[in-house]
Image (cartoon, rainbow, N blue to C red):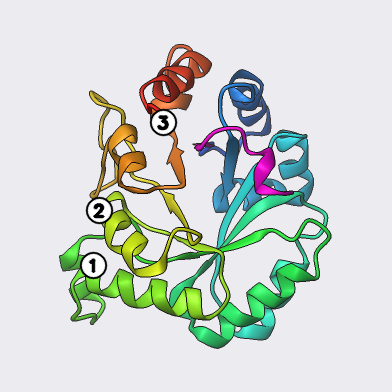
């Protein structure tokens, strides 16, 4: 699925394992967002068949964050052949060989999805990195991992809003930046620690905005998505 089919930068994150609930969200937002995101919870509960049932023809970001030895990750990428996702995620901390194997495997798929590297989860702050033995600052670690991802042939990375500018400067205009932790003004931060408004994230250089509960829990998800788009000044 080519990027040109994505009509706007909003990716609606559907965080449920219930197929019918997910279908209801997709039916509500499919004409007002660029894509939907389904993740590990949904995939574990419902598999590829469930993903296809929910996504249909709506552009899909399949966010499974593969992290294993290179051969296993490459095999996992190839195993998504029956799912028409335009983006798939892997963990950059799996290393260069793993990322190269994933990028190569994606080129063997008919839809040639973009492989996107997860740097530091947006639920993690500085103290969380220190807890797992990483001494770099969050921004230093993100820059290091993004550079490695680009060298390994990945199409882009997932990063927090606060790393957009440093990664855009470091990696150039063609490297995709997928940004969760996006909250319209007045929305709850939820479990995200590093957040930003949609307009500010786009102005700093984000390519795609991953927005979940502010859209899915709104009285009218479609109206909320259109309201967010209206404020982006694209």
Q: How many marks?
A: 3
How many residues crowd around disc 3 within 10 Å: few (fewer than 14), some, or many (20 or more)? some
Q: Is residue 96 left or right of residue 3?
A: left
Give the x, y percent position of residue 24: 64, 22
* Badge 2 element: helix
Circle nearer the viewer, 2 or 3: 2
Residue visible at 41% across and 19% down in the picture: 230
Give the x, y percent position of residue 175: 49, 62
Q: Is residue 119 left or right of residue 216?
A: left
- Circles 2, 1 touching at the beta carbon (< 8 Å): yes
Where residue 139 is drawn, which disc sits there?
Answer: 1
Q: In this picture, which residue range is highlighted in magenta? A: 1-12
* Badge 3 element: helix
Q: Is residue 130 left or right of residue 69?
A: left
Asked if 226 appears above or below 164 in the picture, the reply is above
Circle nearer the viewer, 1 or 3: 1
User: Is any part of residue 229 visible from this angle?
Assistant: yes
Frontmost residue, 107 versus 46: 107
Residue visible at 76% across and 49% down in the picture: 84
Residue visible at 28% across and 74% down in the picture: 141
Q: Earlier in the sequence, mark 1 or mark 3?
A: 1
Where residue 213 is drawn, which disc sits there?
Answer: 3
The CA distance from mark 1 to mark 3 is 26 Å
**Circle 2 residue:** 162
């Amino acid at each position: 699925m080519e990027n040109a089919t994505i009509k706007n930068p909003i990716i609606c994150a559907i965080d449920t394992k219930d197929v019918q609930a997910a279908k209801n969200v997709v039916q509500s937002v499919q004409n007002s967002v660029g894509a939907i995101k389904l993740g590990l919870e949904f995939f574990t509960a419902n598999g590829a068949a469930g993903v296809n049932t929910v996504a249909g023809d709506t552009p899909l970001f399949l966010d499974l964050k593969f992290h294993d030895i290179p051969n296993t990750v490459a095999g996992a990428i190839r195993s998504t052949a029956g799912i028409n996702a335009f983006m798939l995620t892997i963990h950059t901390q799996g290393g260069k060989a793993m990322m190269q194997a994933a990028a190569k495997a994606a080129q063997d798929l008919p839809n040639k999805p973009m492989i996107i590297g997860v740097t530091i989860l947006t639920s993690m702050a500085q103290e969380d990195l220190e807890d797992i033995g990483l001494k770099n600052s969050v921004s230093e670690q993100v820059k290091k991992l993004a550079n490695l991802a680009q060298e390994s042939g990945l199409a882009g990375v997932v990063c927090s809003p606060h790393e957009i500018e440093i990664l855009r400067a470091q990696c150039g205009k063609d490297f995709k930046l997928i940004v969760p932790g996006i909250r319209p003004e007045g929305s709850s931060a939820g479990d995200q620690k590093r957040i930003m408004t949609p307009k500010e994230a786009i102005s700093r250089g984000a390519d795609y905005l991953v927005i979940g509960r502010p859209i899915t829990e709104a009285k009218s998800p479609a109206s909320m998505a259109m309201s967010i788009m209206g404020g982006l000044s694209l």
